[in-house]
Amino acid sequence: MALQAAALLPSAFTTRKEGKSGAPFKDSSLFGVSFSEYVKADFNSSALRCKREYNRRNGVVRAQTIASAPSVTRAAPEGKKTLRKGSVVVTGASSGLGLASAKALAETGKWHVIMACRDFLKAERAAKSAGIAKENYTIMHLDLASLDSVRQFVDNFRRSGRPLDALVCNAAVYLPTAKEPTFTAEGFELSIGTNHLGHFLLSRLLLEDLNKSDYPSRRLIIVGSITGNTNTLAGNVPPKANLGDLRGLAGGLTGLNSSAMVDGGDFDGAKAYKDSKVCNMLTMQEFHRRYHEDTGITFASLYPGCIATTGLFREHIPLFRLLFPPFQKYITKGFVSEDDAGKRLAQVVSDPSLTKSGVYWSWNKDSASFENQLSQEASDIEKARKVWELSEKLVGLA
Ligand code: LMG
Ligand code: NDP
Ligand code: PMR
């Protein structure tokens, strides 16, 4: 793994802002352009906790489920003295942010990481060269570009008998130079198909497993990005994210009789990626609205910073790959090393103070996490509901 040594930021674990109520925080900015918001501390109220406990004991979850769920031994969380090791699934843990977060979580000694990867050997090599101890990880095959593979993964995971305490939807593809669309096994445009639809099915199916866990704080994290948010400078670099009226998604993104793009427009690989990140952030919020109160599961998203050295840019032109890291390091100052970004994601998975649900986390330059404001489109309630319903149809849940 090419974990960059250039750590511009101190560890996110050690410097966390507490008592954020009412305090404005600034996002990292370019030339003084910054985005801030008032952060409200809203950790679980006792009333909500009571309802949650009731629902958990009675197995209340409105998720669509498949029949083969094994039973997970449950114990009353309040009766526990020592916390067992958590069990977290991280998709796309064979490189970049996924690998760095797997390493950060494993190193705490508190987590066993299930690395859900499409390339088994690559993942094994990556885990070894990152120095993740054998007993702290398991690699399981998952190709998000195939819904059969997603269902197979869920089956295999259940057969393993492990509980599911946290799920991290991290994997993504970015195809900025593609002139024509490429497609998943089911014929969806590859960026939306992988980044959004594959994760949508995975998280819908695994919600049941998360709900069965007796772990004190169960979390479903979906990685978002600044580039999907048009309320930022980065989100205004063309082509901009825009889901339009979702006519392409409704048409199945096949590129045959309908468009391969969510908004029904001409194919643009960079836009498809940014649109997929908007879908990711909308999905997280829709999960929150539909399930947080009943299940107590924390749903959250994040922008980990610009990790300009990862494999995400593998399809970009060589000049871009050469200039992008120094551009982000010295000009935008949005650069973050893979190591530090991994710690940020690990923090969202396991920090006891980050239990708030429905939140999009970002970090200040001093590495303090704060709740960030999503763009208008990425926080559009009606659009979130429509994306959810159309996605359900496409992945065969409705
Ligand atoms: C497209 O290119 C590609 O075509 C597409 O394939 C895809 O990749 C897409 O978004 C991804 O980008 C768009 C174009 C940028 O990309 C470029 O060609 C530029 C590449 C830049 C890469 C970084 C190189 C920087 C070079 C500097 C050298 C650094 C060296 C460091 C050395 C350090 C030494 C100390 O898009 C453009 O079209 C560029 C012009 C647009 C700029 C937009 C800027 C934001 C505008 C925001 C205005 C909106 C207002 C928002 C509110 C803000 C208020 C101010
Ligand atoms: P990488 O390319 O390094 O990692 C992406 C991972 O996704 C790889 O492990 C890759 O597997 C995996 N993957 C791709 N397609 C599939 C598939 N079909 N099935 C299973 N796994 C798949 O990129 P990053 O680490 O940068 O990206 C991770 C996340 O971070 C993404 O969600 C991205 O949107 C987000 N992000 C990244 C930023 C950045 O600056 N880099 C900024 C903001 C957000 P393989 O190793 O086999 O290719
Ligand atoms: Mg962007 C504060 C300024 C900032 C930040 C934080 C990012 C992050 N970018 C910023 C500014 C700019 N970028 C500016 C001013 C430009 C024009 C020169 C610019 C260009 C640019 C390109 C061409 N940026 C890019 C690209 C990509 O191909 C990347 C992309 O959009 O992938 C979808 C990208 C990114 N810039 C970022 C981040 C985080 C990315 C990676 C995208 C992601 O993971 O979501």
Image (cartoon, rainbow, N blue to C red):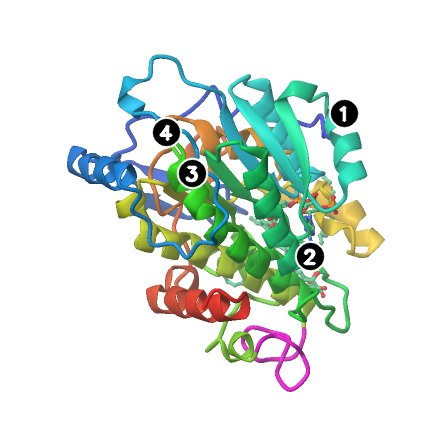
Q: 125 or 40, which lies in front?
A: 125
Q: Is residue 190 magenta?
A: no
**Residue 74 numbered tag:** 4
What amino acid does circle 3 point to?
A: Arg
Eyeballing the image, is 306 above or below 185? above
Mark 4 or 2, nearer chain start: 4
Find numbered disc 1 in the image and state the secondary structure of the residue it sits on.
helix
Task: Kindly tell me whether mark 2's CB lies below 8 Å from ligand 3.
Answer: yes
Question: Label 2: few (<14), some or many (≥20) within 10 Å?
Answer: many
Find numbered disc 4 in the image and state the secondary structure of the residue it sits on.
loop
Residue 233 in view here: no
Question: Label 4: few (<14), some or many (≥20) within 10 Å?
Answer: few
Marks 4 and 2 sit apart, C-alpha to C-alpha, by 40 Å
Task: Say which residue label 1 marks.
Answer: 128
What amino acid does circle 2 point to?
A: Tyr
Labels 4 & 1 near each other (Cβ < 8 A)? no
Q: Percent from the top left, x then y, of residue 147?
A: 62, 59
Marks 1 and 3 sit apart, C-alpha to C-alpha, by 27 Å
Mark 1 or 3, nearer chain start: 1
Say whether residue 27 is left or right of residue 130. Answer: left
Residue range (magenta): 252-267
Task: Say which residue label 2 marks.
Answer: 174
Marks 1 and 2 sit apart, C-alpha to C-alpha, by 26 Å
Say whether residue 295 is left or right of residue 247. Answer: left
Q: Nearer the viewer, mark 4 or mark 1?
A: 4
Mark 4 or 3, nearer chain start: 4
Residue at point 76%, 44% (across, down) = 119
Q: Percent from the top left, x then y, of residue 165?
A: 46, 33
What amino acid does circle 1 point to?
A: Lys
Q: Nearer the viewer, mark 2 or mark 3?
A: 3
Task: State the quadrant of the C terminus.
Answer: bottom left
Task: Say which residue label 3 marks.
Answer: 219
